[in-house]
Structure formats: C-alpha cells, structure tokens
Amino acid sequence: MIADVDEVLRKLLIREIDIKGNEIDVQFDMPKREWSSRLSKPTINLYLFDIRENLRLRGSEQYRTVARDDGSADIHRNPVHISLRYLLTAWVKEAEDEHILLSNALMGLFRNPFVPEDLLPESLRSQPTQIPIEVANFPNEQGPMDKFSELWGVLDNEMRPAVMVIVTVTMDPYKPITVKKVSTRELSVFQDTSKPQATYGRPPAASTPTGYLEGPDGQESQVEVTLASSKSYFAATGKIRSDKYDLSTLSAILVEKQAPLQIDAQGNYALHGIVEGEYHIDILFNKKVLKRQKILVPAPDGYDIQV
C-alpha cells in the first residue's frame, strides 16, 4: 500500500507541474549527501521518514458487531488510519530555480486536498473515505522526527527548504471473529451456612471464607464460613420468526406468569428472573393465539420460535 501511495504522489506531481518527458525527476530516496551529489537534473524528492497511526481518527469504540441471521454475530475490529509523512524537497543547482520548483510542487499539492479518484490504483479504491493530503502542516506531536534540523543531521546533508506532506490511508488487516449468540444467562444466589465457634458479635460477610467474631472482652474468635447454593435464576433471549405475519402485528405472553413479552422490530424477546423448568409462550395475532410454544430453561438449542 505504501508503494501505491508513492506512485499516486508521483503521478499527481507530474500532472500538476506539467512535467514533460524526463526533464524533472520525482524520487523517494533518502536525501543523503551521497545521493544528492549524483543528481544530474532537477529533482523533487519525497522522503518517507515517518509512519504512525492517526490517533485523531481513532474512535472510542474499537470493535463493531454485525448480527447474522443464524443468531451468531461477526465481531469486526475497526480499521487503522495510518499517516505517511514525507519530507518534500526540490534539488536544483540554482537557488532561484529550486524555489520555483518547490513553489510549483506546493501549489500543485494545495490544489488537491484529497487524492484524485482517477489516480487511485485498485488497491486504494476500497478506502472508506477520500484520502486526505495535508501540506505544510506541522504536527502537534513533539519528537525528534518532527524537528527537521535533527533529521538533516541524521541524513548527513546540508539543511534545505523542506515541506511536510502527510497522506493518511486506512488499513484493515483484521479478520472478523464469528461468535455464537448468548441466549441464556444464569445468576446463582448463595447463603451463609457457617457454624461459628462463638455466637457473640456480628457475623462475618457471607462472601468471606474465613471470618472473625469479636467478643465482649475485645478478643476475636475465628469462624469458618462455607457457602451453599441457594437458588439459580435465568435470563433468556430468543427470536420470533415468521414468513407469513408482520412481526409488528404479533404479541407474546409467558403463560405461567401471564406476563406480556416485549418484541422488538427484529422479533427479539427476553425472559428475566425465571427458574429452571418448563414454560410456555403464546404467540398472538389480533388477540388470538397462533401458537403455543413449549420451552425448557435452560435450553441447549435456544429459544427461537417459528410462527
């Protein structure tokens, strides 16, 4: 993808500056002293010196979930927005000609705040938005790579007028993860069945395996706390499906509690605070029962109902 961005910038500069033939080179080499000494004609150089994630474009939610018809869901990690930072320089023997070439390159890039669609290769056509081009925009982040004087020192070359060009592309290296829908949740309530060695003082917390009781004399007696399961409650979710009826015209009742069930636009419904056992759900149309569905809680095959 980086090589494709290089080629896009090359074509954009050639078109905007109206370069004929090979009168001006567009290169992407590291502008070291040895490289610049070999130049034989005017050259625009775009040196890619920094690659980093654009944190401004990172959303608060890093994952999104897409439901599937079979009740499972695909979990997608959001793509990464990568900013490619180029150091644009012009290399001509005469300073006046250098400044003219640098100005023409600047004007050409300023005319294109986004990469033109007709210059995009196939690999960049699937970008979610237009690809922005930032020109001569000094970044907020501070660091050695943002200080051009230090950068030129590393390159071992004389410092020249330079412009930062930032191209931000979206990369999606992640594959979605498919997970099964959770249809049953269990809540177990425990009770304290401890037998303290001393009966005075306040009892310890039920969740504490070992506790202490304080007597009238201020001394503490250790007690062992054991937990025993008292009761389990379940929450269950299912989906009502129908090829004949509009879901908005249907209603549902949990027969054992004579409690209406809320059905959303997709046909999803939920049961709350029920214990293990057998239940029945009536599906109604115009207050008439279309179907009575028996369900077991917990149910190994889910709670979907076809009407």
Image: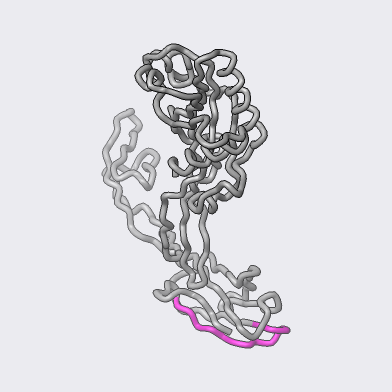
- Furthest-right residue in this view: 286
Q: Is residue 85 visible?
A: no
Residue 110 percent coordinates (x, y): 65, 31
At 49% across and 70% down in the image, what residue appears? 71
Coloring scheme of the render?
one colour
Count of labels in the image: 0
Above or below, 153 relative to 280: above
Of residues 1 and 241, the one nearer the viewer is 1
Residue 291 magenta-drawn? yes
Residue 133 percent coordinates (x, y): 59, 35
Above or below, 165 relative to 161: below
User: Which quadrant does the N terminus fall into?
Assistant: top left
Q: For residue 185, which quarter of the picture? A: bottom left
Of residues 137 and 67, the one nearer the viewer is 137
Q: For residue 267, which quarter of the picture? A: bottom right
**Main SS category, magenta section:** strand
Q: Is residue 285 left or right of residue 59?
A: right
Q: In this view, does 160 lie to the left or right of 131?
A: left
At 51% across and 27% down in the image, what residue appears? 44
Magenta segment: 284-296
Q: Is residue 158 left or right of residue 15?
A: left
Residue 104 magenta-drawn? no
At 48% across and 51% down in the image, what residue appears? 123
User: Which quadrant does the C terminus fall into?
Assistant: bottom right
Of residues 205 and 28, the one nearer the viewer is 28
At 58% across and 75% down in the image, what residue appears? 257
Q: Can residue 290 be seen in this view?
A: yes
Residue 256 percent coordinates (x, y): 56, 78
Residue 219 percent coordinates (x, y): 29, 30
Of residues 296 and 179, the one nearer the viewer is 179
